[in-house]
Amino acid sequence: MFSKYLRLGLTALFFGLSVWQFIEVEIGNGIMWLLLTGLVIFTYFRNERILQAFWFLRKNEMDKAEKALNKIKNPEQSLIKGQLAYYYMLQGMVQSQTGIGKAETFLRKALKTGLRQKHDQAMAKLQLAGIALAKRRKREAQVLLTEVKKLDSRGMLNEQVRMLKQQMKRI
């Protein structure tokens, strides 16, 4: 919605207003401006469209998630590195429902850009393993599944890994 430079400018402005209000002994107004500063900083690190897309993806509404992601114009310039990685991951998950070629490209970009959490890396590699299996690249799928096991320390993806291994036996 807003560029990252505008967000930083608003943060500086709101923080300055907060300091001014504290100097003027208007404590309530100073606290309000400080809270607004925190809100703008939060949206700098967590893009609202990406959060919206995560919400729709969780509810399994792929078309709404895709619309939310498509509202982000020029993601390479408007998103910071961490947000860009999650943007690519979400695009890959949405595209995996329609075309696996584009999905594979987006998921590889997400891993290359750098997903922060190991669970998210495991999820992306699990999707890539499913795509590799669909393209009959059994060896690549096996390598990706072993990486998923290493990354998934909580065992939340065990059932999906087991299902992919069952499919792998059929090929």
Image (spheres, rainbow, N blue to C red):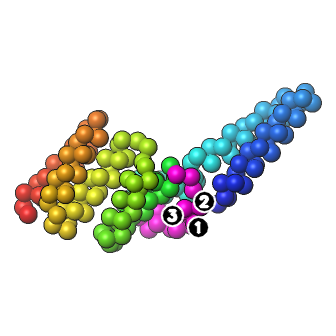
Residue visible at 46% across and 66% down in the picture:
66
For the question of whether residue 112 can be seen, the reply is yes
Left or right? Give the position of 159 relative to 3.
left
Is residue 97 found inside the magenta-colored segment of the image?
A: no
Residue visible at 66% across and 43% down in the picture:
41
Label 2 or label 1, whichever comes before in sequence order: 1
* Predominant SS along the magenta part: helix
Residue type highlighted by circle 2: Ser
Image coords of residue 63 (percent x, y): 44, 68
Query: Distance between the Cα atoms at labels 1 and 3?
Result: 9 Å
Q: Secondary structure at mark 1?
A: loop
Magenta-drawn segment: 62-81
Residue type highlighted by circle 1: Lys
Image coords of residue 37 (percent x, y): 72, 41
Q: Residue furthest front?
A: 112
Residue visible at 82% across and 36% down in the picture:
18
Mark 1 vs mark 3, foreground winner is: 1
Q: Residues within 10 Å of mark 3 (few under 14, many from 20)?
A: many
Using the image, determine if residue 154 lies above or below residue 130. above
Q: Mark 1 highlights which residue?
A: 73
Q: Mark 2 highlights which residue?
A: 78
Is residue 80 found inside the magenta-colored segment of the image?
A: yes
Q: Mark 3 highlights which residue?
A: 69
The picture quadrant where one finds residue 30 is top right
Q: Secondary structure at mark 2?
A: helix
Using the image, determine if residue 22 lies above or below residue 102. above
